[in-house]
Amino acid sequence: MFTLSSDVLSMTNEPAALLQNRRLVFANAAARSILGENCVGKGIRELFGDEVAEVQAPHFVAAVPVSGSSRLLRFAREGNMQIVFFSRPDPDLALFSDAYLQALRSGLMNMNLAAGAGQRLAEERDDPALMQCFCRMNREYFKLNRLLANISAARDVIAGELPKSFSAVDLGALVSDLADSVSLLRPDVAIDFSVDRRVLLWADPQLLELLLMNLISNCLIHAEGLTRIRIELNALSDRVYLTVRDDGAGIAPEKMSTLFHRYRAAFELNELSLGAGLGLTVIRGIAEAHGGALMLESREGMGTMVRVSLSRSLAGAGKLRDDPKAYTSSMERLLTGLAPCLPEECFGGKYLD
């Protein structure tokens, strides 16, 4: 197994390596250029960090810093061997041009103004059928607004220019507030959470909200057969681990390697308003902006788990306070972040007023 695998990996230009008993036993030339010529013999924790070392799943993907650069890692286990492939998060920026984004913003603004005027007219006429039409239009507006937010954030992540405004944040309170709101909007899905309401860290609260929205909406959109989402928040001395699990159908191993690049491959037109796979890119970028990493593991028939690690106190960011400023999501941001997975009735007067 080792001889065959090392021979095969030696012939590929993609960085790849083999581990046995959690130690590196082979790295091809491309992988050695990343890990160093003396990488063979080193342990998985030393090479890839604590987040990767703790994963027990046979197949998983990770977005972690390796040798000072962001890398996407794909792990697969065969017998007592573990194969890891490396790639860089380097998509084509053409999709994210300023002209494209500005045109989308302008169209959305006009759409929102027209929908608002039409909805007021429908209310004055007390026309339920017309009101339903404008609920549907409002939902499409919020879906496109979500897509725009993710495209803008993904562009900033790719360019290494994600804007950040750090302050002391109680992540436990933010998670609890958001979970309660999701339960209100989607009562058909049970939202369980195990959260310490006093988990302080130095962070950008709006970025953390965007990260959470994408984690939860990914479950609601993609987890076939979903009935329950569980959110866990564990704080250690210098790190916070946020875990979101679903009880859906899980992801096939052969699809795991494309999760971070779906927008680069062909996708159906009806996937465009769902985000076309941008959510994980945004989550990865926000995690890395907070000194953390992203891990994803899934087993068919057993659901999917995404774990994000965050630094509790980034160097030079400032001293944490015991009384962080309260941060509560607005209904407009909730409707935007969850638009593809909410029923049309959420986009009428009840939540929009």
Image (cartoon, helix red, strand yellow):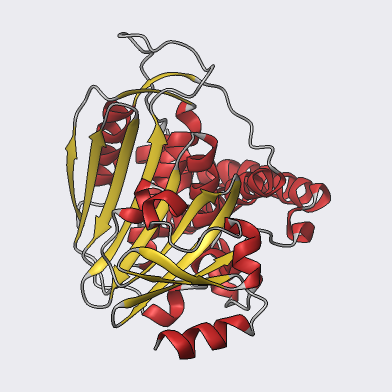
Q: Nearer the viewer, residue 52 or 7?
A: 7
* Residue 238 vertical position relative to residue 52 in the rendered view, above or below: above
Please name the residue shown 55% across and 54% down the image: 281
Residue 353 sits in which quadrant? top left
Please name the residue shown 45% across and 27% down the image: 205
Q: Nearer the viewer, residue 83 or 163?
A: 83
* Residue 250 vertical position relative to residue 5 in the rendered view, above or below: above
Please name the residue shown 49% across and 56% down the image: 280
Residue 209 sits in which quadrant? top left
Extreme residue in the right direction: 99
Quarter that holds the N terminus: bottom left
Q: Nearer the viewer, residue 235 or 231?
A: 235
Instruction: Say left or right for 244 vs 221.
Output: left
Residue 70 appears in the rendering: yes
Q: Position of residue 168 (x, y in %)?
A: 41, 17
Number of callouts: 0
Instruction: Say left or right for 236 vs 31.
Output: left
Instruction: Say left or right for 165 vs 256.
Output: right
